[in-house]
Image: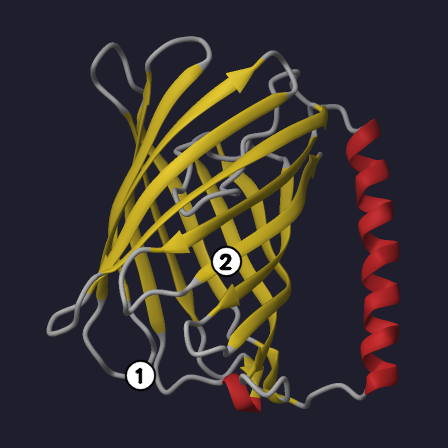
Amino acid sequence: MRLKTCTILEHLACMKNACLLLVATILLALTSRAQEDKIETDRPGESQSTAVVEKGFFQAENGFRKEQQKNGDYSLFHPRTQLRLGLLKNLELRADVASKTEKNSSGQDSRNGLQPVELGLKAKIWEGKGALPTASFYTQVGIPNWASEELQKEDVFPRVRMLFENKLSNNFKLLYNAGAEWQGNGGPPQWLYTLQPELQFGDKWEAFAETYAYLQSGQAAKQYVDAGVGFYPHHNIKLDVWGGKGLSAESLDYFFSAGISFRFK
């Protein structure tokens, strides 16, 4: 599957249609019949939640992100969207779609288009109790040719993680992940870990801080710290903003992101 880069007019038309679709789906989320529990998302932050979308519900998590390299190059995701569908009580299906622009330090576009689409699932393994954490399993597989020609990969590239969560109080929980990701270039995987404490403020606000790292054989670790906040204008809608900093020479210089997530039935 080969996708050509849109012209400027086509980009504008796509953005207009995307905005209209976003408004329509937010209105649907506001009027949707859903459980009173707040939406649980996998953004902001690198840590994935153990929560699975309830059976019969649809959830979309949308974000815009900038990643700045230390040499002045940077990448824009405009947007990245995670689509999640509750299939069974403890199982959801997922699709990850992202539009990306890479610019060099001179400010000129180097590559622009659709990244490879990723398909996957998340399954809850057990519910936590006391010191025993809640545990889930998450995997996605990137399809190398389901992308714009400039951004296609050589091979499929899976991601696998074990997800854990300890609820330490009614307002405080600890998320942590461990897993591996392949890059689609035939090389070895990157191993990763994340650790994210999260605090709830009343019914509408939450904040988190996080540390995580990617480790690959023969290379120095890419280490990061980040933090952010989330706001719930409605129990079916969440707004977020977050950013972080690389701690090692091989990591990004910094990144920041903002997004909106919603669910409906």
Label 1 SS: loop
The x and y percentages for residue 191 are: 21, 59
Q: Amino acid at mark 2?
A: Phe
Residue at 38 percent across and 9 percent down: it is 169
Left or right for 117, reference 224: right
Left or right for 231, reference 23: left
Residue at 63 percent across and 48 percent down: it is 258
* Residue bearing mark 1: 185
Label 2 SS: strand
Position above or below: 63 against 164: below
Point out the tag, 1 or 2, that comes first from the N-terminus.
1
* Residue bearing mark 2: 255
Q: Amino acid at mark 1?
A: Asn
Circles 1 and 2, Cβ within 8 Å, touching? The answer is no
Residue 35 picture quarter:
top right
Position above or below: 98 against 86: below
The x and y percentages for residue 240 are: 62, 39
Left or right for 242, reference 237: left
